[in-house]
Image (cartoon, grey):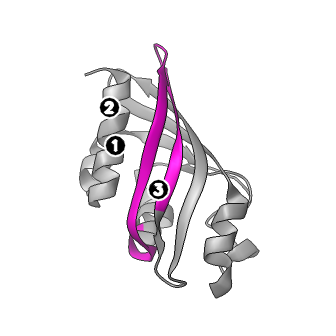
């Protein structure tokens, strides 16, 4: 399996809501960093470790979104990095608003294990979809 194949697998499992399969390919000390000003972590500070990622992101996002997916437009692979450009699509349950936001992900991979994730996303688009219920800058 190539690193790009591994990341495609991660997206597939996230879309299916299969957190356990996702966590199985994450390093125990994986660093998971959302864009600065993201409604879930405005500071942009990373969560480190599977438990922190599960608690702070997967459990929350899984409960709040319908039909979340990434429409992958391009994948660039190097020996230890996979860069993915695409669009986030889905509906935010609390507001009923549909998301269509530009996104870029940088994944670090070593020996078939995901070491880190860094997201760059149109946070203004996220706030447009999510802010009506006070998610905003409350962190």
Residue lying at 67% horizontally and 51% vertically, measured from the top left:
35
Q: Residues within 10 Å of mark 3 (few under 14, many from 20)?
A: some
* First in residue order: circle 3 vs circle 2: 2
Q: Nearer the viewer, residue 114 or 84?
A: 84
- Residue at coordinates 24% horizontally, 48% vertically from top-left? 21
Asked if disc 3 and disc 1 are in contact, CB closer than 8 Å, the reply is: no
Looking at the image, which residue sits at the far top? 79
Residue 65: name its quadrant.
bottom left
State whether residue 88 is above or below residue 92: above
Q: Is residue 53 above or below residue 11?
A: below
Q: Which residue is mark 1?
A: 10
Whether residue 134 appears in this view of the structure is no
Comparing labels 3 and 2, the label whose residue is closer to the camera: 2
State which quarter of the image contains the N terminus: top left
Classify 10 Å Cα crowding around label 1: few (below 14), some (14-19), many (20 and above).
many
Q: Which mark is residue 24?
A: none
Q: Tell me the CA gap for discs 3 and 1.
A: 14 Å
Magenta stretch contains residue 74: yes
> Is residue 11 left or right of 88 when viewed as pictured?
left
Q: Which residue is mark 2?
A: 6
Which residue is drawn at the image coordinates 51% and 54% (left, top)?
88
Q: Is residue 22 above or below residue 55?
A: above
- Residue 115 screen position, x and y as percent: 46, 33
The stretch of residues the image draws in magenta is 62-89
Q: Position of residue 100 (x, y in %)?
A: 55, 59
Q: Secondary structure at mark 2?
A: helix
Q: Is residue 77 visible?
A: yes
Q: Main secondary structure of the magenta part?
A: strand
**Residue to which mark 3 is pinned:** 53
Disc 2 + disc 1, Cβ < 8 Å: yes
Judge from the rendering whether residue 11 lies leftward or rightward of residue 94; answer left or right: left
Crowding at dot 2, Cα within 10 Å, few <14 / some 14-19 / many 20+, comes out as some
């Amino acid at each position: 399996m190539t690193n790009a194949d591994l990341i495609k697998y991660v997206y597939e499992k996230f879309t299916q809501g299969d957190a356990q399969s996702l966590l199985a390919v994450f390093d125990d000390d994986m660093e998971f960093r959302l864009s600065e000003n993201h409604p879930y972590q405005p500071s942009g500070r990373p969560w480190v470790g599977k438990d922190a990622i599960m608690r702070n992101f997967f459990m929350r996002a899984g409960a709040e979104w319908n039909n979340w997916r990434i429409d992958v437009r391009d994948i660039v692979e190097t020996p230890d990095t996979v860069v993915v450009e695409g669009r986030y699509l889905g509906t935010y349950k609390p507001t009923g608003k549909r998301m269509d936001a530009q996104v870029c992900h940088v994944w670090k991979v070593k020996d078939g294990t995901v070491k880190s994730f860094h997201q760059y996303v149109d946070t203004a688009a996220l706030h447009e979809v999510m802010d009506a219920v006070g998610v905003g800058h409350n962190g």
